[in-house]
């Protein structure tokens, strides 16, 4: 018996829509974005939509191709995260494509935008460590050289929180890594520990940096959290499988569902001004802080 399969091309001709949504970001190897893509796909399926995922590799060409897909009719709209473009640049690229911009880059008056409350989140993380009696708090995981907007916000907020507690700002405790990932974080922290071990807590830029941190501490027989407490950021699924389990800054609301709602409203004809939504946070406590 011959099976009749849906013809997406025919559906586009009949309805003017592909019922496919684009999701674009730089690197699928980063667990946070892989998990976010999964959440987006699950939420989209409830609305009868499929998801087309694009890795831009952080290049201008890759980012421009995202909107070429939309102009060709492949997708009805796009949710994207560009670390090195601001909202105005995204607005110029997108043309008439319904778009929601994720992340901490400067927003635009023309594009819907969803971000996390990085500043109060970093302050709360430092406050939590301070409440545990920690006074030599390091920050680990930002880029060497030019910082992404996310790193800049988290690092500056960490500094503000230290100052609020009248703790000194020690450049030796601001530990950058050469590239994203846990191995570079482990290497960077190891070099510091071998010459400057005077820290009792570490706030990490993301959970991959925290994974590298735990490994560097374990290889030097430094107990966590007894000697050094560790807080990650993003609360990826792997965080609860580590030993010790990881305390991490987490989104208190569903970012994927929030972004999808904004996108579907645009696809369905909403023409109001750009909306800017901030996702609240909470500290997901694990064993890496006492």
Image: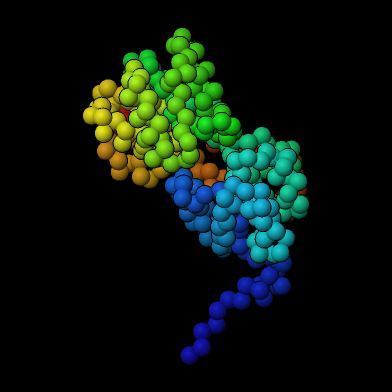
283 over 53 or under it: above or below: above
x 46%, y 47%: residue? 30
251 over 269 or under it: above or below: above
Rendering quarter of residue 234: top left
Q: Is residue 14 visible?
A: yes
Please tell me which residue lies in front, 25 or 141. 141
17 over 266 or under it: above or below: below
Q: Position of residue 189 (x, y in %)?
A: 38, 29
Q: Quadrant of the C terminus?
A: top left
x 31%, y 36%: residue? 215
x 71%, y 73%: residue? 14
Left or right of residue 95: residue 85: left
Count all numbered tags in the image, as a single digit.
Answer: 0
Please tell me which residue lies in front, 226 or 256. 226
Please tell me which residue lies in front, 56 or 230. 56
Please tell me which residue lies in front, 279 or 235. 235
Left or right of residue 9: residue 251: left
Q: Is residue 118 visible?
A: no
Report the colour scheme: rainbow
Q: Position of residue 204 (x, y in %)?
A: 42, 31
Left or right of residue 202: residue 149: right
Outermost residue, bottom direction? Answer: 1
Q: Position of residue 241 (x, y in %)?
A: 30, 43
x 41%, y 35%: residue? 185
Left or right of residue 95: residue 238: left
Rendering quarter of residue 22: bottom right
């Amino acid at each position: 018996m011959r099976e009749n399969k849906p013809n997406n091309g025919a559906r586009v001709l009949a309805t003017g829509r592909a019922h496919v949504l684009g999701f674009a970001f730089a690197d699928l190897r980063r667990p946070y974005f892989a998990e976010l893509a999964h959440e987006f796909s699950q939420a989209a399926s409830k609305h009868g939509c499929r998801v087309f995922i694009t890795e831009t590799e952080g290049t201008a060409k890759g980012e421009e191709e995202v909107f070429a897909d939309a102009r060709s009719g492949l997708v009805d709209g796009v949710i994207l995260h560009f670390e090195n473009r601001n909202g105005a640049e995204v607005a110029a690229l997108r043309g008439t494509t319904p778009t929601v911009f994720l992340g901490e880059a400067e927003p635009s008056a023309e594009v819907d935008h969803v971000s996390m409350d990085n500043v109060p989140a970093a302050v709360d993380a430092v406050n939590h460590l301070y409440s545990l009696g920690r006074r030599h708090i390091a920050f680990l995981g930002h880029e060497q050289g030019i910082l992404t907007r996310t790193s800049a916000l988290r690092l500056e907020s960490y500094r503000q929180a230290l100052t609020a507690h009248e703790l000194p700002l020690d450049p030796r405790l601001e530990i950058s890594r050469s590239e994203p990932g846990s191995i570079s974080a482990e290497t960077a922290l190891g070099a510091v520990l071998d010459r400057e071990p005077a820290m009792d807590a570490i706030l990490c830029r993301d959970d991959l940096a925290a994974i590298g941190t735990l490994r560097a501490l374990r290889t030097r027989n430094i107990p966590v959290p007894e000697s050094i407490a560790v807080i990650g950021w993003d609360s990826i699924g792997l965080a609860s499988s580590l030993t010790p389990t990881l305390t991490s800054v987490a989104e208190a609301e569903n970012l994927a569902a929030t972004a999808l709602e904004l996108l579907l409203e645009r696809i369905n004809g909403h023409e109001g001004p750009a909306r800017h939504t901030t996702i609240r946070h909470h500290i997901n406590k694990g064993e890496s802080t006492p």
